[in-house]
Image (tube, helix red, strand yellow):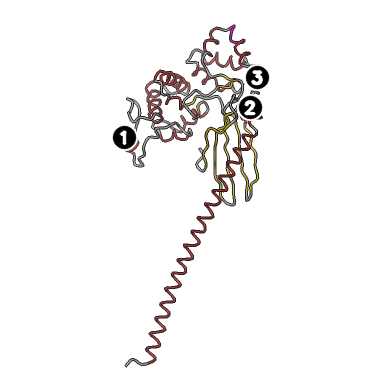
């Protein structure tokens, strides 16, 4: 027969083990609840941030006419004065929004145009631009072919391009986008597009929605845009002639396209060079970049606003949380 003292000790030990087990379970449950609460709180804050970003878009739409009016004025210096930054208060933080007219640029997404003749023309224009940036011959051809394969929807690799096989062979393999660029930052994934080249391209190119040429606001050009003018005119205008055309702009800007046409009418070479280009004297696309700052978190966003056309101003593209 087991003595009573030993029975009491065994019972006490059992109770202690049960209590310890319950304590561990309670700690684990508390941790799980805390993590779930944190996740729910983060999800709620993200939802608030997303709505705040949409509110910033609405504010930009409300001021679209002012943006278009400001785009009629020539820039000073390098054009940095054309950016406007505002802080919009929201519950628990603020939205910092910067609006800027999309500078005159070569839309890299034009390389995905379904018309092969148009693609060939755009490739020739981009070749001229790359040459002005110091890229020559076969290297320029390879860069353009690689970018075209990244943008087009097929999986057929062009002679100098790159499709899935090239990218999947990497240690951190991935597939080709097979869709238009969303941001120039995507170029970092493409062979040959070095950091220096991407920086140089950023001054003259963009990733605008669609495959059409980006509208060229003649009142937004600066002297630094001469290489772009040289490229889009397919070399018809030399760099010196492109600079003279930019410098010929009236101090208050071109009042209308008719005024530009009148100026070019007495200069046949210039008139021919400008024929067929999507010229404007006011901005049409405006880029909004911002951050929603709530508590200790920050959520970036970006959008493109189109205005200044017969259609009402509208947001044509936006992203949240991964703005480039």
Which residue is located at x 33 percent, y 91 percent? 2
Whole-angstrom CA distance, mark 3 to mark 1, is: 50 Å
Q: Which residue is mark 2?
A: 68
Q: Position of residue 277 (x, y in %)?
A: 52, 17
- Can residue 264 be found in the magenta stretch? yes
Within the image, what quadrant is residue 315 found in?
Answer: top right
In terms of secondary structure, where does tag 2 sit?
helix
Q: Position of residue 141 (x, y in %)?
A: 38, 23
- Can residue 261 be found in the magenta stretch? no
Magenta-colored segment: predominant secondary structure: helix
Q: Position of residue 146 (x, y in %)?
A: 38, 28
Density class for disc 1 (Cα within 10 Å; few <14, some 14-19, many ≥20) is some
Which residue is located at x 32 percent, y 93 percent? 1
Whole-angstrom CA distance, mark 2 to mark 1, is: 45 Å
Q: Which residue is mark 1?
A: 165
Q: Nearer the viewer, mark 2 or mark 1?
A: 2
Among numbered discs 2 and 3, the one appearing first in the sequence: 2
Among numbered discs 3 and 1, the one appearing first in the sequence: 1
Q: Which residue is mark 3?
A: 253
């Amino acid at each position: 027969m087991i003595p009573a003292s030993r029975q009491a000790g065994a019972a006490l030990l059992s109770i202690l083990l049960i209590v310890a087990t319950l304590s561990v379970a309670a700690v684990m449950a508390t941790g799980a609840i805390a993590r779930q609460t944190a996740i729910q709180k983060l999800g709620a804050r993200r939802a608030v941030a997303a709505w705040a970003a949409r509110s910033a878009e609405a504010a930009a739409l409300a001021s679209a006419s002012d943006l278009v009016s400001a785009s009629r004025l020539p820039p000073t210096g390098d054009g940095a004065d054309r950016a406007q930054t505002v802080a919009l208060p929201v519950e628990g933080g603020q939205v910092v929004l910067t609006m800027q007219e999309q500078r005159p640029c070569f839309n890299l997404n034009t390389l995905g145009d379904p018309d092969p003749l148009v693609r060939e023309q755009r490739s020739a224009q981009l070749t001229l631009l790359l040459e002005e940036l110091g890229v020559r011959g076969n290297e320029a051809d390879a860069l353009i072919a690689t970018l075209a394969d990244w943008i087009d929807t097929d999986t057929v690799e062009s002679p100098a391009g790159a499709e899935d096989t090239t990218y999947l062979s990497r240690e951190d393999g991935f597939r080709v986008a097979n869709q238009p660029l969303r941001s120039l930052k995507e170029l970092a994934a493409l062979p040959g597009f070095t950091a220096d080249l991407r920086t140089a391209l950023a001054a003259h190119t963009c990733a605008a929605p669609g495959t059409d040429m980006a509208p060229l606001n003649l009142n937004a050009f600066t002297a630094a845009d001469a290489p772009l003018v040289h490229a889009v005119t397919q070399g018809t205008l030399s760099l010196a002639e492109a600079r003279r055309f930019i410098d010929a702009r009236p101090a208050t800007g071109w009042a209308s396209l008719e005024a530009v046409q009148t100026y070019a009418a007495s200069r046949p070479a210039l008139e021919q060079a400008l024929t067929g280009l999507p010229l404007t004297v006011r901005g049409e696309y405006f880029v909004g970049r911002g951050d929603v700052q709530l508590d200790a978190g920050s959520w970036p966003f970006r959008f493109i606003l189109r205005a200044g056309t017969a259609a009402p101003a509208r947001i044509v593209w936006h992203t949240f949380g991964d703005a480039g």
